[in-house]
Amino acid sequence: METATATKTKWNLDAAHSEITFKVKHMMIANVTGTFGSFAVDTQTEGDDFTTAGITFSTAVSSISTGSADRDNHLKSGDFFNAEAFPEIKFVSTKVEKKSSDEYVLQGNLTIKDVTKPVKLDVEFGGIGKDPWGNQKAGFTLTGKINRTDFGLTWNAALETGGVLVGEDVKIHAEIQLIKA
C-alpha cells in the first residue's frame, strides 16, 4: 500500500508587508537601528506545515540603511561588509522546530562576507489568513542575536572613557508575510 505524500507548497515574499531590521549598541550607551530594503525569501513547505519548510533568504548589502549616509557608506566599505566583494548576505535553513502552536526555532546557516556559521532564530507564527483579494498569506516574527565579529565584521574604535564605539552583538528582528503561490 502506497502512502500519500503532502503536496509541495511554494510561498512568495509579500515585500510590501515585510521588513528586516537590526540593532547594534553605539558607544555602549544606545542602540542604532538599521534596515535592509532589498531582500528575497524563497520558501517551500509540505502543504501548510511550516515545520517542513525549506527557506532561503538573501539581502543586498547595498540596501542597508541606518538613517545616515556616511554610516551606511562605512558599513558597505571594506571595514565592515565589503559590499563590492560580497554583495549579498545569505541564510539557508537546516531545521524548523515547533515549540508550541505559534512558536518555532529556525536553524540554518548564515553567510556574511565569506564566513558561514550556524544560527538559531526564534519565530512567532502569526497564522494563515486570506486577504480581501483571496490571497492566502502566512505571517511570522523572527528574532535573534549574532556576534558580528564571528562573521569578520571586526572594525571598531576605542573610546577615551573606556569601551568601544560599536557593540559586538547584533539583534535581528524581521516581520515576514508570505503569499501562497
Image (tube, rainbow, N blue to C red):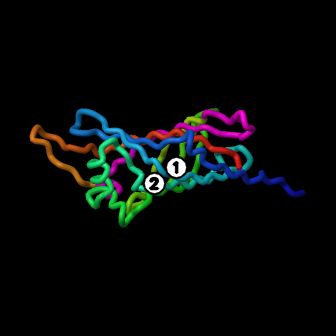
Within 10 Å of the Cα at label 1, are there few (<14), some (14-19), or many (20+) other Cα atoms?
some
Quarter in which the N terminus is drawn: bottom right
Residue flagged by tag 2: what amino acid is it?
Answer: Pro
Q: Is residue 134 magenta?
A: yes
Residue 55 position, x and y percent, is: 58, 53
Report the disc number at residue 118: 2
In the rendered structure, which disc, 2 or 1, sits on the residue that comes first in sequence? Answer: 1
Residue 44 position, x and y percent, is: 66, 53
Point 47% across, 57% down: residue: 90
- Please, what is the dominant secondary structure of the magenta stretch? strand
Q: Is residue 123 above or below residue 117?
A: above
Tell me the CA gap for discs 2 and 1.
Answer: 7 Å
State which region is magenta. Answer: 126-153
Q: Is residue 155 above or below residue 170?
A: below
Residue 47 position, x and y percent, is: 74, 47
Q: Is residue 118 left or right of residue 180?
A: left
Q: Is residue 43 magenta?
A: no
Count the marks: 2
Point 60% across, 54% down: residue: 42
Mark 1 sits on what residue? 107
Point 46% across, 47% down: residue: 37
Q: Is residue 124 left or right of residue 23?
A: right
Within 10 Å of the Cα at label 2, are there few (<14), some (14-19), or many (20+) other Cα atoms?
some
Secondary structure under tag 1 reads: strand
Residue flagged by tag 1: what amino acid is it?
Answer: Gln
Residue 164 position, x and y percent, is: 19, 43
Task: Tell me which corner region of the image, top left, top right, bottom left or bottom right, holds residue 83.
Answer: bottom left
> Which residue sits furthest bottom?
85
Point 36% across, 64% down: residue: 84
> Which residue sits furthest left?
160
User: Decide: marks 2, 1 in contact (CB < 8 A)?
Assistant: yes
Secondary structure under tag 2 reads: strand
